Amino acid sequence: MDVMGDKATLFETGRFVQPSGEEAEAVPDVDETGEAAEEVRLRLAADAGDVEAASVLGALLLRRADLDGAEPHLRAATAAGDRAAANNLGVLLHQRGYADEAAGWWRIAAVAGSAAAAHALGRHHRERGDEPAAEYWLRQSAEQGHVLGAYALADLMEHRGDDGAEQWMRVAAERGHREAAYRLARALDRRAAERGALERGAVEDTEPGRAGRTPGTPGAGPGATGAADRTTAARPTDAGGDAVRGAGPRSATGLGVPPAEEAEQWYRQAAARGHRRAALHLGAILERRGELKEAGRWYLTSAKDGEARAACALGFLLRDAGDTENAAVWWLRAAQDGDGNAANALGALHAERGQPQTAERWYRAALDAGDVNGAYNLGLLCAEQGRTTQAEQWYRHAAYAGHREAANALAILLLQGGDTTGAEPWFSKAAEAGSVDAAFNLGILYAGRGEDAAALRWYERAAAAGHTEAALQVGIARLRDGDEQDAELHLRCAAGGGSAEAAYRLATVLDARRPRPSAHELGEVVHEKTECEEWYERAASQGHRRAQVRVGMLAAARGDVVEAARWYRLAAEAGSRNGAFNLGLLLVREGSEPEAVVWWTRAAQEGHGRAALRLALVYARRGELDEGQRWADRAVTLGPAEVAERAARLRDALRQELTA
C-alpha cells in the first residue's frame, strides 16, 4: 500500500510522511542537522498544544519509520480535527497491520476532503473485494485531482471492462503518472494494430511479437525447404505498477493524430521518467523505423534498469552492427536473468563459432526458460551433426508445443527417411499454422504424386505469402494453362524475390510479345535494351545458363560482339552446350577456328548435334576424313532431324572418298 498523504496540505506545511514507491520522489531531502533542529522546534510546539506542529512532527517521525514515536502525536492531532494527521495515522496503522482501523481513519480524513485518504480507502476496499465501495472512494479522489486516485480508478475500471477506463488513465498520464502513460500507450498500440489488421482483412496479435533475427538451417530434401529462426528478438508486453508525478503531453486523441503516433508519445514520456518497459517498447518502435542509434539508447536505458528483453534486443542491434563480442555480453546478461530468447542467441553464436557443446547448453537453457525455440534449435544442431534420432526427438518436442517450423523440419526429416505418410500430416499442421515453407513443401509432395490441382492450391497459398519458388511454380502452371497475364504477375513476384528461373521465364514471355528487331552487322553496337533483355540479364547475372546464352544472342543481334562473347563464354564454362556452340560460331566469324573447335568439341561431347556437324565439316575441310566421319556419325545420332539428314549426306560422301 502506498503512503497516502494529503498533498494539498502536507507539501505546503511539511506534514508529509516517508512514502514508499512512487511518492518517494516527491519528498524533499533535509540535511540531518536541519532536521534535528526542526524536530526540537516541533516537539516544543506540540508539547505547548500546537495541533499543526503535532501533525507535522508525527509525519516526520513516520517518515523516519519511528512508528512508536509518531503515533501519539498523530493521534493527538487527529483528535483535534487535523485531516492530514488522520490520513497519516491511517498509514501508520496500515504499516502495523491494522488495516481495518487504518480504513476507519482514512474514512474520517476522506470525508473531511483528503483526496489521498480517499485513494487509500478506495484501494483498501478493492483489496477486500468490495469494488462498488472502491470505485466510489477512488472516484472521489480522482475528481479532486489526485493522480494516484485517477490511476487506481482507471485500473479498476479497466479490470471490469468499463468504457471510462481510458479517460481516467489519460488523466493520470497527463499529470505525469508514468505507469498510466505506459498503459495508455499499450492500449493505443493495440487499437492501432487492430485497425491495421481490419484494413488487411485479418486479426493479428497486437502485442509486439517475436521477430526473426538469425536465419536457421533449412532442412534438406528433394525440393523441400525448411525455414525457421535459430533466435528471435522478444518484444515487451506486460505492465507494472510504477508511477511518477509531473506534467505530460496533452492528449492527441481527437486532434487527428493516429493512435500509433500518440502511443509513441506516451511511451516516450513514460520512458523518460524511468519506465523500463516503456523504454523497451520505444526502442522497438524506433528500431522498426530504422532509427537504430536512438533505439539502442533506449534499449540500453531499459537494460541497465534490469529489463532482460531490452538487453536481448540490444544484443541483436550490436550483432547486426557487427559487434558480436558486446552483443554476447548483453545476451549473457539477459540469459542469466531468464530470457530464453537471449539464451537461443548465445546458442546460435556458439554454434557459428564451431562450439556445439556450448551451443547445446544454451539451447537447453532457453528450453528450461520456457522458450520452445530452444527445442527446435537443439533439433537443428543435432541434424547438423548427423544425430538424426535426437534431431527428430527435439523437432517433435517443439512441434507438439506448436512450433510450426519444427513441424516443417520434422516432416522434412521423415520425408528424407522415406516416410511420406508420416511427413504429410506434419507438413499440413505446419502449413495450417502459417508456415509458408510447409505450404510450399506440401505443393512439392502433391506434385510428386501427380496431384497437380492439390499441389497448385498449396503453391498459391505459399505464393500469396511471398514465397518466391511457390510464385514461380504458380507462374509456370498459369503459362501451361494459357493464362499469360496471371503468369506474368506471379513470375514478376518470383523474379523480384530473386528467382533466376522466374526472371528467365518472365523474359521469355516479354520476348515473345516484342516485335522482331532489325538486323545489325557484327561490330555495329546498338545500346538500346528492352525490358525483356533486362530480365534476361538479371537471370544471367545470377548464373542462369540459358539466360546467359540468350543475352549473348541479343548482344550479337545488336552487333555487340564483345558482350556476346562474354556471355557465351560464361554459359559455356558453366556447362551450357548452346553457349559453347554459339561461342564457337562467334570465334569462327572472328577468325579463331582452332578455339572454336575446342568449344564445339565440348558441346558435341555433351550431346549437341549441330556442334558435332560443325566438327565434321571442319575435319573434312582439313582432310582428316576419318575424324570427320566419326563426328558425322555422332551428329546423325544426336539430331535433330535436319542436322541428322545433313550429317548423313556428309558421312556418306566421306565414306565414298575414303573407299575411292
Image (tube, rainbow, N blue to C red):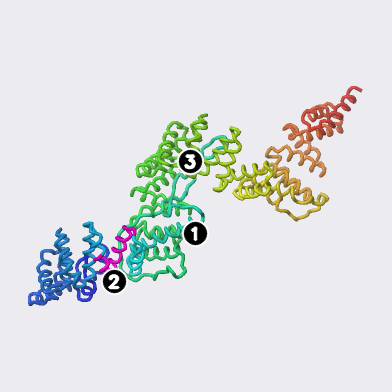
Confirm or deny contact between disc 3 and disc 2 (CB under 8 A).
Answer: no
Indicate the amino acid at tag 2: Gly
Task: Please give the residue where the numbered disc 2 appears in the rendered image.
Answer: 145
Indicate the secondary structure of the residue bearing disc 2.
loop
Indicate the amino acid at tag 3: Ala
- What residue is drawn where x is 45% and y is 44%? 230
Tell me the CA gap for discs 1 and 3.
31 Å
Instruction: Count residues near mark 3 (Cα–Cα under 10 Å), then give few for <14, some for 14-19, many for 20+.
Output: many
**Part of the protein shown in magenta:** 136-161
Percent from the top left, x then y, of residue 433?
47, 43
Percent from the top left, x then y, of residue 461?
55, 45
Task: Please give the residue where the numbered disc 3 appears in the rendered image.
Answer: 430
Percent from the top left, x then y, of residue 78?
13, 71
Percent from the top left, x then y, of residue 104?
15, 65
Task: Please give the residue where the numbered disc 1 appears in the rendered image.
Answer: 290
Indicate the amino acid at tag 1: Gly
622 displayed left or right of 429: right
Instruction: Name the one closer to the observer, 313 or 152.
Output: 152
Q: Specify whether residue 31 is painted magenta.
A: no
Confirm or deny contact between disc 1 and disc 3 (CB under 8 A).
Answer: no
Look at the picture and state if 143 lies above or below 357: below
Look at the picture and state if 479 lies above or below 179: above
**Extreme residue in the top direction:** 659
Residue 254 shows in the view: yes
Instruction: Count residues near mark 2 (Cα–Cα under 10 Å), then give few for <14, some for 14-19, many for 20+.
Output: some
Magenta residues, dominant SS class: helix
